[in-house]
Image (spheres, grey):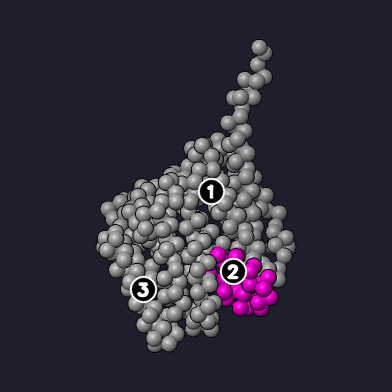
Amino acid sequence: MYSMFVGHGLLAFAIVALVAMSADVDRDRATALAVVAGLFATVPDVDMVYALTGLVGVPGSSPLAVAESFWSASTVVHRSMTHSLAIAIPATVAFALVGRSTIATAVSFLLAASLIALGTLVSGPITGLVALAFVATGLLVGAAATRHGLGPAAVAGTAFVGLVTHPFGDVLTGQPPELFYPFPFAVFDGRVALSADPTLHLLGAFGAELAAIWLGVYAFSRLRERHLRSALKPRAAVGAAYATAVLVLRPPTVDGSYTFVFSVLAVGFVGAVPPRKHLPEGLTAVTTGLAGVTVAGMAYLLAYLTMDLAPLLALAGQPF
């Protein structure tokens, strides 16, 4: 199953960084705020810790079986409590208060304990354990931000952006997030479909994550006062060769995307690393590799559409 992992953090990073810079916040502070927002945006996915139980008893010699078992176990509690907008509000307060005064920290721990109790009472002990992992990770991020000099308002703002943007990045893949858990209000009754064709839907979801990553890289370049064009190398064009994958790979879908994702990322790695002994500078490697992946994805899309249209074009060319 395809899921947007990297994009969550980079989207929150980009939003906070670009807003902070537009408000004339100095670059060092804007960077700190953006990094904290990115970390908070990854916290909801700690619910994947339960998916590790799916690896028990699965033979390691079969990578696809391991991946399938992992994702199957993840559906038990994934995208429920930790992806709720209703839970994000008290969680934000708890994460912002930890490490302040004794009273503030006590209130933070009380809120955290209440969230764990809520998850346990509403959905059972497994969700309670996931809630424990969720609040513990968020409290660690909040405490680290406090130690690095961010005030409660800054931590609350970054936590809110990270926690609230995260579930909307999941509406295209897998089961929909329970946006108002524990209340029985279902906003989505299934994943949002970009196309009736499952392969085109996957490519659209993949493109959405690439867009979030590009936005994060752009924001980072702004923070470092670098131009992305200067970091982009022509070897990214190697990604165009990935169009040939349409001839050998089974058409990928969200529920069976491993081969596509791993192979297209390998193309990006080839584009990022030049045929020389020394590695490229960080932003150059990331930008060129990401461009290679983007070119590869677009090349595959065009090839896939061409394969789909070929029979129709052949039919249209026949005489009546």
- Amino acid carrying mark 1 in the image: Ala
50 within the magenta span: no
Rounded to the nearest angstrom, the CA distance separating label 1 from label 3 is 33 Å
The crowding category of the residue bearing disc 3, from other C-alpha atoms within 10 Å (few below 14, some 14 to 19, many at least 20), is many
The mark that comes first in sequence, 2 or 1, is 2
Residue 133 seen from this side: no
| SS at mark 3 in the image | helix
Q: Residue furthest bottom?
A: 102
Q: Mark 3 points at which residue?
A: 112
- The rendered magenta stretch, by its main secondary structure, is classed as helix
- Amino acid carrying mark 2 in the image: Val
- Amino acid carrying mark 3 in the image: Ala
Rounded to the nearest angstrom, the CA distance separating label 2 from label 1 is 23 Å
Residue 248, given in percent of the width and then of the height, sits at 52, 37
Image mark for residue 16: 2
Magenta range = 12-37
Q: Which residue is drawn at 51% across and 55% down?
A: 169
The mark that comes first in sequence, 2 or 3, is 2
Rounded to the nearest angstrom, the CA distance separating label 2 from label 3 is 25 Å
Image mark for residue 205: 1
25 within the magenta span: yes
- Numbered circles on residues, count: 3
Residue 30 seen from this side: yes
The answer to whether the residue labelled 2 contacts the one labelled 1, judged by CB atoms less than 8 Å apart, is no
The crowding category of the residue bearing disc 1, from other C-alpha atoms within 10 Å (few below 14, some 14 to 19, many at least 20), is many
Q: Which residue lies furthest to the top in this view?
A: 320
Quick one: quadrant of the C terminus?
A: top right
Q: Which of 73 and 272 is in front in this view?
A: 73
Q: Residue at x 56, y 46 (%)?
A: 204
Q: Residue at x 70, y 57 (%)?
A: 233
